[in-house]
Amino acid sequence: MIHIKRLQEDGVDIVALVGEIDASSSIELDLAIARSVGEGFIKILVDCSALEYISSAGLGVFMSYIEEFKDKNISMVLFGMNDKVANTFQILGLNELLQITQSKDQAKQLIHEV
Amino acid sequence: MKYKYKVGCSIENLKGVRDFIRTSLRQHSVPDLQIGEIVLALDEMCSNLMIHAHHCNADELFEINITIGKESPIIFEIIDDGTVFDINQFIEPELGNIIHEKRKGGLGIRLVKSIMDKIEYHKRDGKNVCRLVKAVSFN
């Protein structure tokens, strides 16, 4: 079960993930990101501080946007992951392909730099 | 100790699978980060089985067994009667290709292979048994 909340701060769309993302719920993540892009946001922060679990279905959603974001000059930063969730990204080396920071402040700083 | 869990092939049931594995392993002082990895690997195996071998049919059941003693490793068995998909025979696409082709598959198998020490398939009593072995360092 995943709950996704969105809020906007200084023109940045913040997508907050609450709960668990697996094969049955990854579609929700996909829709939330697609909605953000559809509304024209070019800076997207993903708040993972209440994300308890993610499987490959969720990782695949993030991966599937990498090229599109490059083409459209959209930047996305993920922040606030707990150790287990961070470990899941690291096992596949996705921490090298996605922008990930620990705190929200760091994430905001990074997204305003790029 | 042996733990058994029977579940229908609806992906809505993956949460139950994860809870079963977490609860079982917590009783044996397996470190949290290792529990997290094992839960992930089993979730990936079960979701593949539910989706590809059983087309998410909630009426088709399969079984998960965990055998855990005082000594490492832990043995997991996934027992079903669908079509066997041997992930050892599957060559995972490069991450670069996954990004380029916007493929959402292949990542799960890569995770399972990274996490588990051994993945074997055999037949028992006419059923498919997928056996996953994982060495752990008990707390």
Image (tube, coloured by chain):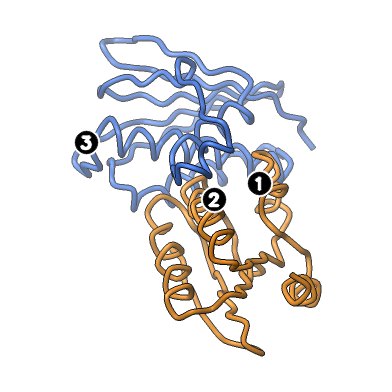
Q: Name the amino acid type tagged 1.
A: Leu
How many angstroms separate mark 2 from mark 1 (CA)? 8 Å
Observer-nearest of A105 and B75: A105
Image vertical order of residue B118 relative to residue A42, above or below: above
Q: Circles 2 and 1: CB distance less than 8 Å?
A: yes
Q: Is residue A82 left or right of residue B102?
A: right
Q: Name the amino acid type tagged 2.
A: Met
Observer-nearest of B4 and B9: B9
Q: Which label sits on residue A94?
A: 1
Label 3 vs label 2, nearer the camera:
2
Expressed as whole percent of the image width and height from the top left, the position of residue B8 reads 28, 41
Q: Name the amino acid type tagged 3.
A: Glu
Expressed as whole percent of the image width and height from the top left, the position of residue B105 reads 44, 39
Q: Residue at x 40, y 67 (%)?
A: A31
Q: Which chain is orange?
A: A
Image vertical order of residue B79 relative to residue A14, above or below: above
Chain B colour? blue
Query: Disc 3 designates what residue?
Result: B60
